[in-house]
Amino acid sequence: MVSPPDTSKTTKLERYNSYLRKVNSSSSTKIVTSTSKILFRTTLLTAVVMILFFTINHPSLSIATTRRPRSLLSSPSFGGAAWEKQVRKSSTPRSPTGISVLVTGAGGFVGSHCSLALRKRGDGVLGLDNFNSYYDPSLKRSRQQLLLKNGIFIVDGDINNSGLLKKLFDMVPFTHILHLAAQAGVRYAMKNPQSYIHSNIAGFVNLLEVAAKHADPQPAIVWASSSSVYGLNTANPFSESHRTDRPASLYAATKKAGEEIAHTYNHIYGLSLTGLRFFTVYGPWGRPDMAYFFFTKDILNGKTITVFRSAEGQKDVARDFTYIDDVVKGCLGALDTAEKSTGVPGGGKKRGPAQLRVYNLGNTSPVPVSKLVSILENLLSSKAKKNIVRMPANGDVPYTHANVSLAHHDFGYKPTTDLTSGLRKFVKWYVGYYGIHLKSESSDGIKDV
Ligand SMILES: O=C(O)[C@H]1O[C@H](OP(=O)(O)OP(=O)(O)OC[C@H]2O[C@@H](n3ccc(=O)[nH]c3=O)[C@H](O)[C@@H]2O)[C@H](O)[C@@H](O)[C@H]1O
């Protein structure tokens, strides 16, 4: 027997078509009685009337049904007086010299820290985040609560939603965008390649389109690139002038593509664009998908951790781990030195050349992953169970090391936190956030290293 169509929500048409197909192909149609035919026609008519009524009353949803990717169908609605009030209040600077910044990915690690720092100095900050489930969304929601307590509202939405972006730019004359929303993670790109295209390419282009052609004034944009763009580069420390045409992962390739896309929008539309190459950023409120975070969790749970070593005879696998507070200072420095865009709102020709920059934001001091593990063991008073394996060919690179002289020259960027001090602060946050009691504790709850 063919079950009746489910006419709920936005997939009505699709389901109804499939219902009709099933009805037509089913042998049971041959024996339908005239009563059931009448019932069927009545249902069909009712459904068509309902769809027409729904489409007239919800034009935006009808577009979503036919054109937008499925992921956006579940986007929460936006609009309404209370929502608009929150948007305006959050994005209005408190300081007379403050800037007004749209922070994409504000529910994320770097985004939440930057939003708080901007707000603290009196800038207007509006967040935007889709709160996806790449990692535990409850951590993102906790960051959202923290931001809300500090007067920062995060709009629940996707950077691919141009209707939402246009509405935000119609409501607020943002001077800057700090674009941090992205699909992160180097190794996950092999599992879910499309998510990198969706966020790091399509989402970025969508944001630039709205910034270039719709926003008035056109904002200056500072955005997150990545140290991973250096890929198979062997010259070090990595300088902005080094080769970046050999990415080792799809993640890196999408970030490199972002840098080229930035060039295009700068060239054609006069958007002021600054890309920041972050080097393995860590700290309190960090990302659970990163090694320092899940090593901490696994060491505390007595679970074996897998530590990568590079091929025989080469250096240890090492990272230029960079503490979040240093990166935040770099982001604010980049925003403060960003010049205005020079394009004509509406997408016309630019009035003159606009600023196009790229900077390394690293720590200038690579640390082997084996050393990261021993620092954590000391801080946690627990011995790690280690499975040491050769680094798999899954997008990883053996070594990163930043030369930050350009960022230092242009906006005084100077990292000041070594890995031991930074991890100490991370562990302190971690045990507090997850309510963990360590075996042996010093006065602040963390074992001295
Ligand atoms: O700078 C960046 O642009 C990127 O930094 C970060 O990537 P990575 O530097 O790879 O950090 P992360 O995964 O924490 O691995 C750290 C170390 O642990 C090693 N590692 C990792 C996993 C494991 O199981 N074992 C292991 O030894 C591993 O080999 C590596 O040496 C961000 O995730 C990424 O989104 C991007 O921002």
Image (cartoon, helix red, strand yellow):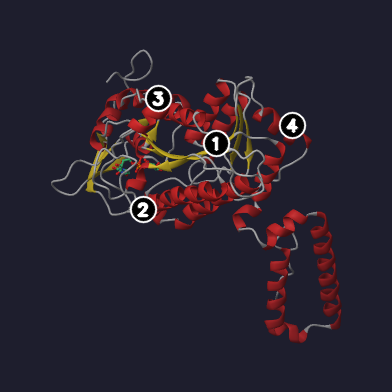
Q: Position of residue 267 (x, y in %)?
A: 51, 49
> Circle 2 is placed at which residue position?
249
Residue drawn at the location 81% of the way across and 58% of the way down: 54
Does the CB distance between marks 4 and 2 fall below 8 Å? Answer: no
| Residue at x 30% of width, y 34% of height | 403
Q: Amino acid at mark 2?
A: Ser
| Residue type for callout 4 | Lys
Q: Is residue 39 left or right of residue 315?
A: right
**N-terminal of the two: label 3 or label 1?**
1
In the displayed structure, 21 sits above or below 415; it is: below
Q: Which residue is label 1 attached to?
A: 107
Between the C-alphas of marks 3 and 4, the distance is 37 Å
**Closer to us: 139 or 252:** 252
- Inspect this view and state whether residue 434 appears: no
Q: Under tag 1, what secondary structure?
A: loop
Disc number placed over residue 82 in the picture, else none: none
- Amino acid at the residue labelled 1: Gly
Whether residue 16 sits left or right of residue 298 in the image: it is right
Judging from the image, what secondary structure is the residue with disc 4 in?
A: helix
The circle on residue 85 is 4
Label 4 to label 2: alpha-carbon separation = 42 Å
**Depth-wise, is mark 3 or mark 1 nearer the camera?**
3
Quadrant of the image occupied by residue 367: top left
